[in-house]
Image (cartoon, grey):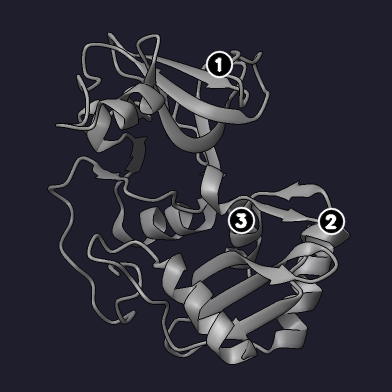
Amino acid sequence: MLNALPREIKPYTSSLRYGICGAAPASAELLKKFEARFGFPLLEGYGLSEGTCASTINPFDGRRKVGTVGLPFIGQHIAIADPSGLHLPQGAIGEVLVKGPNVMRGYLGKPEETAKTIVGGWLHTGDIGRIDEDGYLAIVGRLKEMIIRGGENIYPKEIEDALFEFPGVLEAAVIGAPHETLGEIVVAYVAFRSGFAGTQQSLNEHCTDRLTRYKRPSTINIIDSLPKNALGKVDKLWLRKMWTEWVD
């Protein structure tokens, strides 16, 4: 929202040392544009309510890696696991697990739900990520958001990041839509900032240059703005409902 302010608005930010963002992954393009405009670094972090809201962050005084959510806080441990809970090696993609004194004791009055979420002291986040050679965590997407098209696993964030590189794109979201033959297909929604525009054809060509064939959206819908939930995150359930109603 700050980055979408009209260009003539120039907030006074010289007293700010840095900012922190979270709640949903920010694209590298958004972070770059924000910092160029406002003049201070924006540190992306990651966490869940079940883990006291913060588990990793890009360091202010150390190396910041755009496209990652940084390093674990002192006293916390991060791991990547396969569906069976087996910890995976560096660079592998899987579910993000968190362990430490910050992890909740459980959901009140819901022992079965707690047992599914905390296994052997590890909090199963439901987020998909990878840990690089320097220990930085990158979030790829949500387990429930993963699209399976013709047997291929597709993570929406990779496609959303590609769409954000198109000039003037303010918001982008990707969902999986039911398909008779393939199981699911990739459907994208894009909103442009004021003063910019693009066509479905130009967006398709843009994706062709950046994504392998099976990851490219079958449909790209250009709308005025993307629906948000109470936390300000893009409401993908609403987008799925919009798609279903449009198809019907």
* Quadrant that contains the N terminus: bottom left
Residue marked by disc 3: 156
Quadrant of the image occupied by residue 58 = top left
x and y percentages locating residue 138 in the rendered image: 53, 34
Picture layout, residue 55 above or below residue 43: above
Q: Residues within 10 Å of mark 3 (few under 14, many from 20)?
A: many
Q: Residues within 10 Å of mark 2 (few under 14, many from 20)?
A: few
The answer to whether residue 68 is visible is no
* Quadrant that contains the C terminus: bottom right
Question: Mark 2 vs mark 3: which is more N-terminal?
Answer: 2
Picture layout, residue 19 above or below residue 199: above
Picture layout, residue 144 above or below residue 185: above
Residue marked by disc 2: 150
Picture layout, residue 52 above or below residue 105: below
Q: Residue at x 48, y 38 (%)?
A: 127
Q: Residue at x 29, y 12 (%)?
A: 100
- Type of amino acid at the residue the image marks with label 1: Asp
Quadrant of the image occupied by residue 194 = bottom left
Q: Residue at x 54, y 43 (%)?
A: 143
Whole-number angstrom distance, CA of label 2 to CA of label 3: 16 Å
Q: Residues within 10 Å of mark 1 (few under 14, many from 20)?
A: few
Residue marked by disc 1: 134
Front: mark 2 or 3: 2
